Amino acid sequence: MAPQLDAYFKQVDSLSDAFIERLRKAVAIPSVSAEDERRPEVVKMGEFLASELKSLGAEVELRPLGKQPHKEHLDLPPVVVARYGNDSKKRTILVYGHYDVQPALMEDGWATEPFKLTVDDKGRMYGRGSTDDKGPVLGWLNAIEAHQKAGVEFPVNLLMCFEGMEEYGSEGLDDFIVEESKKFFKDADAVCISDNYWLGTEKPCLTYGLRGCNYYSIEISGPGQDLHSGVFGGTAHEPMTDLVRVMGTLVAPDGKILIKGIDDLVAPLTDDEKALYGDIAFTMDNLYESLGSITGIYPDKERTLMGRWRYPSLSLHGIEGAFSAPGAKTVIPAKVIGKFSIRTVPDMEIEAVDKLVYKHVNDAFAALGSKNKCHVYLQHAGKWWVASPKHWNFTAAGKAVEHVWGVKPDLTREGGSIPVTLTFEQATGKNVLLLPMGSSTDAAHSINEKLDKKNYIEGIKLLGAYLHYVAEEPMNQG
Amino acid sequence: MAPQLDAYFKQVDSLSDAFIERLRKAVAIPSVSAEDERRPEVVKMGEFLASELKSLGAEVELRPLGKQPHKEHLDLPPVVVARYGNDSKKRTILVYGHYDVQPALMEDGWATEPFKLTVDDKGRMYGRGSTDDKGPVLGWLNAIEAHQKAGVEFPVNLLMCFEGMEEYGSEGLDDFIVEESKKFFKDADAVCISDNYWLGTEKPCLTYGLRGCNYYSIEISGPGQDLHSGVFGGTAHEPMTDLVRVMGTLVAPDGKILIKGIDDLVAPLTDDEKALYGDIAFTMDNLYESLGSITGIYPDKERTLMGRWRYPSLSLHGIEGAFSAPGAKTVIPAKVIGKFSIRTVPDMEIEAVDKLVYKHVNDAFAALGSKNKCHVYLQHAGKWWVASPKHWNFTAAGKAVEHVWGVKPDLTREGGSIPVTLTFEQATGKNVLLLPMGSSTDAAHSINEKLDKKNYIEGIKLLGAYLHYVAEEPMNQG
């Protein structure tokens, strides 16, 4: 029989202001993992989480990860691990989230202060990290608090793993998870991660697949220092000229990856798989709304979803070292670093992709006949992941969604990568579920990132409900 | 007979510490004209110049130029105009310089604080603006002071015009010069500008030609906001993909401009002109030293000098709106602005070049078949200039160089553009001379910009000596 959740739900509603206040405090800490000078803020955010968890009665530990690779002057932020409940008769669920965020500057075009949670009249809560991933992380804490205040027994033992380097490739976390899978995490019966998004804005989903991400840098250098283009233009090989040409060979305007051999690594589309896309609740208008434009590549929903989920993509993110400010600067940059990443899918192995990328870039640069130097390297990589949606972990989550939102969730895959998902699956050997809280218009990684109040509050109910259904699901391995 | 300059020279030597102190004060004012928030510092620098001139007994006026075009919230910095001496029996020389500087940040890689003049044991005086153009501008003030303290009569009437927007296209100055050529500047018999550099590090030169500069922006936009490359990669047209491809069509790695029709605008090389290049004191090692690398395009001095002086060049300066910081950000930028400029030579008219650039960029973008939007426009332009080196203005300067440095100067052209040079020639109808103070390794517009103490002090002697020879030269129109 379905669990009795009314008391818990009521409590979540009556605590909603307090829960929004908790999110406001978290967003106010600019825990940007990509900016060295912000590292103390990242640590501060981890300590904030730890103290909140302690006050809820959880066992908490701040686990150091040592120095940051290639930046030995920097300590990696600690992993916050916690346990709530230790009843051998209950199932144990391991949840993961991250407390670091993407960079954000007012100059980037934010309408409100990125690190000040700002709620508008439509209940949209704007702020860096609101939806990625501070809202969902606090969701677990809020679920615990609501159970306590409602006097409802917590249905499972909860293990928590919150990291502070997710937006910078989860440096140092993999080894930690592998090690702790035999220790702190050893009791886990299944894993749940809330760090992705609904496909649209109306219908919840459960996610069983992710693309991977290989992030590369192409460094081209020549002169000993930046040069005046008037004095040296026309006499010296210019790194920007070379870099722009090399970057231009990577991908076509229609998104087709031009690196020889990449297509051969992609698993062919089967008829069964193809049939799945028709029923997904998604329209081209969903895409256009979240894009903020009608610049989609494909006219139809099916091919668009495949482009996001099951085919690789290559994006050029920017150039470090060139003139990037407004105005006019007549400089010849001496060293420029082009950044791009490839979203990977079955069966693209990280190293196989590296090999093709290095060969392509080095060949493309050699073809230029430039006297400058070119060095291409992988900044970080996370492999793609596909899980079984028939496991009790997914069944429980599906029932919880139906209970909270009154609709069966879509079973989806995601275009984004959450590298640790695969690590958890491999290290624990358990089923991993992705249970999103936010919607497609939340603009994670963009300006004006937000989380809708409704998604936050109902999301807290959902996380709690999921744990209750987990407690009742019969064993199966999916 | 040669003028008696020993007393003046001695005085310059004995005041050298004070003159370096004056430069230190000027460098300490970060008068960056391209950064809106630094505008008050630019104004402060103009006021510093005015007060120094007043204390030397010159008539000084700070002339407003009104609002900055396209930035109506900003006042343009004032033009500092001054007159020293008003004797109708003397010749009147109009000198120009600029008191604004290029942007400079410690993070760019400066070895010392860019706005703190730092003198090393080799007498290299590091600091933004030291050589471009605060050193030369103060050179005129120092020459006046040394004459006064040496009790040597000042040989000419000196008119001065110092602007604060040179590094941002000399906004507003042209109309001002045209107007004042009939008023404040009406007595000018010739013009002298010290805002360029020796070709090498040992031999001074006089410069009679400059390349022009057309500075362009290519703006490509699509999505309403930056996007997460995982969520949207492979489903939408990406502005960076388009921009990099368009920028890649502009210039070849060997510096050849690929915009159809540009070559046809370039005046053909005559045998007479070709013959001039052999004698110029310049070696490939001079180039390599100033480059800080051996990444020159041509193996020989002649073709290299032609590449700098008499052929056009195109440089890609950077991209605004893309990810430009260190680290890894998986963003799809929504709007990116590519910046590039073309150095122009006889007979390339500004508008003729615009027309070819716009057509090329629009055609190149159309060929991509992208749904994004592209807009190409001219940010600012300055025409090339070539003067007569046989005029008495040049003869006098040549004798002064020989007197101070003991060597006949090379007659050179420059790759850089000083747009006002042409404006002064056209507005006053007088001969314009470029009399450089700094050397080829001064790294103007780069990190670690410097001026050698010797070039500064001997340069002050040179400016004064030039005025004495000017006073003695017979009339000729060159």
Image (cartoon, coloured by chain):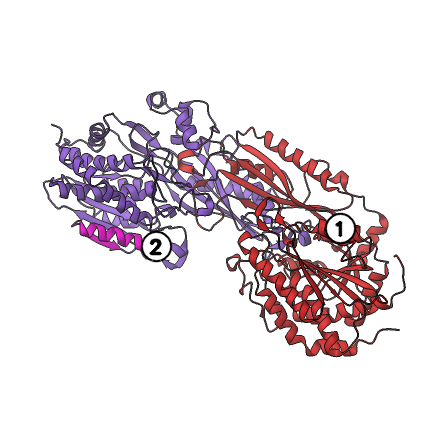
Chain colours: A purple, B red
Amino acid type at mark 1: Val
B383 relative to A411 in the view: left or right: right
Number of marks: 2
The percent coordinates of residue A441 (x first, y second) are 37, 34
- Image quarter for residue B140? bottom right
What chain does mark 1 sit on?
B
Amino acid type at mark 2: Glu
- As for residue A55 lying within the magenta part, the answer is yes
- The reply to whether residue B116 is visible in this rendering is yes
Q: Nearer the viewer, residue B264 or A385?
A: B264
- In the rendered image, the vertical position of residue A133 relative to residue B232, given as above or below: below
The residue to which callout 2 is attached is A41
Tell me the chief SS of the magenta region: helix
The quadrant of the rendering that contains the C terminus of chain A is top left
Tag 2 secondary structure: helix
Q: Do tags 2 and 1 sit on the same chain?
A: no
The percent coordinates of residue A403 (x first, y second) are 20, 28
The residue to which callout 1 is attached is B178
B235 relative to A465 in the view: left or right: right
- The reply to whether residue A188 is visible in this rendering is no
Part of the protein shown in magenta: A43-63
Between label 2 and label 1, give the one nearer the viewer: 1
Q: Nearer the viewer, residue A334 or B193?
A: B193
- In the rendered image, the vertical position of residue A48 relative to residue A446, given as above or below: below
- Image quarter for residue B266? top right
Tag 1 secondary structure: helix
| Residue at the image point whose x is 56% and y is 28% from the top | B369
Q: Which mark is residue A337?
A: none
- Image quarter for residue B165? bottom right
Between the C-alphas of marks 2 and 1, the distance is 56 Å
Are there few (<14), some (14-19), or many (20+) residues within 10 Å of tag 1? some
